[in-house]
Image (tube, rainbow, N blue to C red):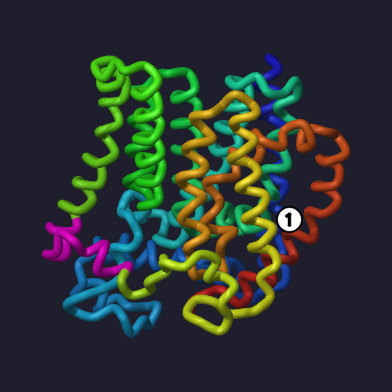
Amino acid sequence: MSKITRDWFYITLAFILSCLVFYGYYFTTKGTKLDIVYKNWDGPSYVLAAISLYKPEVAYQNNFINSGDIRSDWTWLPAHFPLYPLLIRAFSFLGYFQAMLLISIGFALLCYFALYDLICSLRISKNPLLLTLPFIFLSPRWFIVSHTGGSESMFLFFILLFLRYLYQRNHWRAAIFIALAQLARPQAAFFGLGLAVVALIELLRSHDLKKIISTYYPYLTIPLSLLLVFCFYRLQTGNFWAFFNAISLTKNLQSIPFQTFSFPSTNIETFWQEVNAYDYVLYLGACLFMFRKKLWQFGILGLVYFIPLIFLQHSDISRYAIPLLPFAFIAYSEIIEKREFSLATLLMSPAVMLYAINFMDHNHGI
């Protein structure tokens, strides 16, 4: 058995054990078993999108989440990009909620393999297994979304592969995976903007426009993916701009920074926001460390994704920052790969699970 195969076996075993313990709690203590897991947001929204295929009249007829903002002529469902709902629909013979959860879990496992592979490609650690294992539990918000319904695990898997092939300068493969990420979540557009900044910097350095165009034109897959999503929305809802109409309901992005510390206000449920201050420091530090590690392209991508986070008026910064986790694991690899860190993560894994259980008890639909 090769080292990589053995390490992947250990990663799979650790993930399966975490699932057995976590889901075992619900099977042994809850009469409804996985009901709360299925209902954790935003899982039900994706299921409704899968059932209705974004058609307002169908969503209205099947409005099991009892949302007052789902009407026969308009819904906010287009805020959730369609790749994940379409996969749920494809595997709906298992049951819509069962398909929702299995797809999320499956992509979570693929994320661990992809991070391991990225670490090996970057050659930043002699022990990629120890650097990867804490990713199962860190961040705690990632633990939740990787064990419930949501498009984050799928999105992060595509981002990890995009980063790997970008580093290897295999631009067509990188372009394919960032396009898939764009079909999964709108936030992929920030990585597209980051690539535009990278291309501009390389142009200023080389003054060779022809070379820059020939290098980066594959990434036109990003706007093409967006166009495909909007055309799909036009077909299903009758509105090409349905996504923008949907996100206008929440208005999460503000013109003034650090609005996550503006309790009481929309989407700010508590004044206990210390964790978001930590997130800002840790993730900005991770982006800046990319330059020290001579991964300046990653640094640009990370910063372009990070900057909008400080203008986000939302308590759940840790969830929106999940795509920056690979940058954090790369930046702080010298600490994370230590056996002491893995031991600490293992010993504190019950705390992560208890946090997840408590969080999900108050973050689910009807």
Asked if residue 343 is among those painted magenta in the image, a careful observer would answer no
Q: Please give left or right for residue 63 compared with residue 325 in the image.
A: left
Q: Residue at x 43, y 18 (%)?
A: 169
The picture places residue 46, in percent across and down from the top left corner, at 38, 62
Q: Tag count in the figure? A: 1
Whether residue 91 appears in this view of the structure is no
Magenta span: chief secondary structure: helix
Q: Please give left or right for residue 212 compared with residue 18 in the image.
A: left
The picture places residue 244, in percent across and down from the top left corner, at 26, 64
Q: Residue at x 64, y 70 (%)?
A: 359
Does dot 1 land on a helix, a strand or a loop? helix
Q: Above or below — where is 277 with respect to 64? A: above
Image quadrant where residue 28 sits: bottom right
Q: Residue at x 73, y 55 (%)?
A: 21
Query: In the rendered view of the protein, which quadrant contains the N terminus?
Result: top right
Q: What residue would you read off at disc 1?
A: 21
The picture places residue 295, in percent across and down from the top left corner, at 56, 26
Crowding at mark 1 (Cα within 10 Å: few <14, some 14-19, many 20+):
some
Q: From which residue to which does the magenta span run?
A: 233-247
Q: Please give left or right for residue 336 compared with residue 176 in the image.
A: right
Image quadrant where residue 23 sits: bottom right
Whether residue 203 appears in this view of the structure is yes
Q: Residue at x 16, y 65 (%)?
A: 237
Q: Above or below — where is 229 with respect to 161? A: below
Give 168 or 273, whichever is nearer the viewer: 273
Give 227 or 195, whichever is nearer the viewer: 195
The picture places residue 71, in percent across and down from the top left corner, at 23, 80
Amino acid type, mark 1: Val
Give 330 or 154, whichever is nearer the viewer: 330
